[in-house]
Amino acid sequence: MTDEEILRAINALPLEAQREIEDFISFLRERYKSSQPKDAPDSDLETEAFVGMWRDREDMRDSSAWVRNVRETHWGNR
């Protein structure tokens, strides 16, 4: 159903049924309010403490090679 079809169907209902739909929408908004994603505040990654924390690690200069080595060490060649 398109939005327009839904609105036509609601408007065709008796006034009491339209009020029930309004109440149901209010109920659903309240019920799912906490599950809606909250807008995260903008953050400047350069000021985050974790950025660059491994910059001096010689063994992690090539991060792809480091991950590949860890996988091979722990899980073998697959």
Image (tube, grey):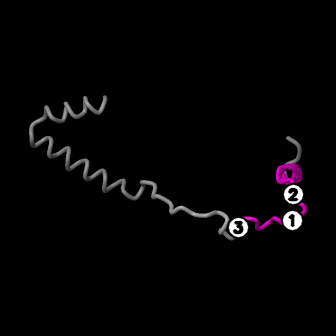
What residue range appears in magenta? 51-74
Q: Position of residue 32 (x, y in %)?
A: 36, 53
**Secondary element at tag 1:** loop
**Secondary element at tag 2:** loop
Q: Position of residue 18 (x, y in %)?
A: 15, 41
Q: What residue occupies the far bottom of the structure in this picture?
A: 49
Q: Position of residue 30 (x, y in %)?
A: 31, 56
- Give the CA separation, mark 3 to mark 2: 17 Å
Depth order, front residue of 17/5: 5
Question: In the drawing, what numbered circle is on residue 13?
Answer: none
Characterize the local packing of mark 3: few (<14), some (14-19) or many (20 or more) Cα atoms within 10 angstroms: few
**Secondary element at tag 3:** loop
Q: Which residue is mark 2?
A: 61
Q: Which residue is mark 1?
A: 57
Which quadrant of the view contains residue 12? Answer: top left
Question: In the drawing, what numbered circle is on residue 50?
Answer: 3
Characterize the local packing of mark 2: few (<14), some (14-19) or many (20 or more) Cα atoms within 10 angstroms: few
Task: Identify which amino acid the numbered label 1 is placed on.
Answer: Arg
Q: Position of residue 76 (x, y in %)?
A: 88, 47
Q: Residue at x 25, y 52 (%)?
A: 26
Please, is residue 34 above or below residue 78 in the view?
below
Q: How many marks?
A: 3
Q: Is residue 49 left or right of residue 8?
A: right
Answer yes or no: do the residues labelled 2 and 1 have beta carbons within 8 Å? yes
Q: Residue at x 10, y 43 (%)?
A: 16
- Give the CA separation, mark 1 to mark 3: 14 Å
